[in-house]
Amino acid sequence: AYAPQEDDPKQIIFNFWEDVENEIIEAQDNNCMVLLELDGNAKLGSEHIKGDPHKCTPNGKILIEIIKRQNLVVANALDICKGIITRERITIDGTEKSVIDFILIRSKLSEYLMNVVIGDDRMFTLHRYTGKEKRKVMSDHNWLFSKFCIHNDKHVGQVRKEIFQYKDE
């Protein structure tokens, strides 16, 4: 998901987060696990993510409320997470570093989470080539990786029950 910027109109921000929460609720109603990876354009602050260089922002407050209401886990904040910074941009004033990308999962799914890595070393950062000289332009976002160990036993399931006997004359 890609959330609106902090300075977008409040109604656009509200509609986006409402849609996200409705999708999470629908998934739960259908007995589905939830894994949401998003550029939240929200800062949660160091009280939620250790090492976050920023304070919680208005978008962050909205996201925190959804996390609480929907019993989600911020995988970035877990002890098994390596790396912190998800966005790094060089400007005239210096380098901006922030944590605005998140992996959110249902608490039930967190039982299967093995590790989370944020590529703040920028080794595998996405890039594109532009112009005639094909200049390499790096994304300002770092990659996020999560590994789960989920086993699916194909033979476990409901026992079939015959409700109509076709062979009974």
Image: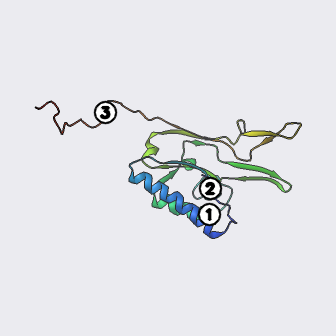
Which secondary structure, mark 2?
loop
Work out whether residue 69 or residue 93 is closer to the camera in this orientation and state it.
69
Which secondary structure, mark 1?
helix
Q: Which residue is drawn at 45% across and 39% down?
A: 112
- Look at label 2 and name its amino acid: Gly
Specify the quadrant that holds the C terminus: top left
Residue matched to label 2 = 40
Label 3 vs 2, first from the N-terminus = 2
Q: Is residue 141 left or right of residue 168?
A: right
- Look at label 3 and name its amino acid: Val
The reply to whether dot 1 and dot 2 touch (C-beta < 8 Å) is yes
Label 1 vs 3, first from the N-terminus = 1
Residue matched to label 3 = 156
| Disc 3 crowd, CA 10 A, few/some/many (<14, 14-19, 20+) | few
| Separation of residues labelled 1 and 3 (CA atoms) | 42 Å
- Look at label 1 and name its amino acid: Asn
Q: Where is residue 68 in the image (x, y as percent from the top left)?
A: 48, 60
Q: Is residue 164 left or right of residue 141?
A: left
Q: Residue at x 19, y 36 (%)?
A: 162
Name the image quarter holding residue 92: bottom right
Q: Against 16, is 138 above or below?
A: above
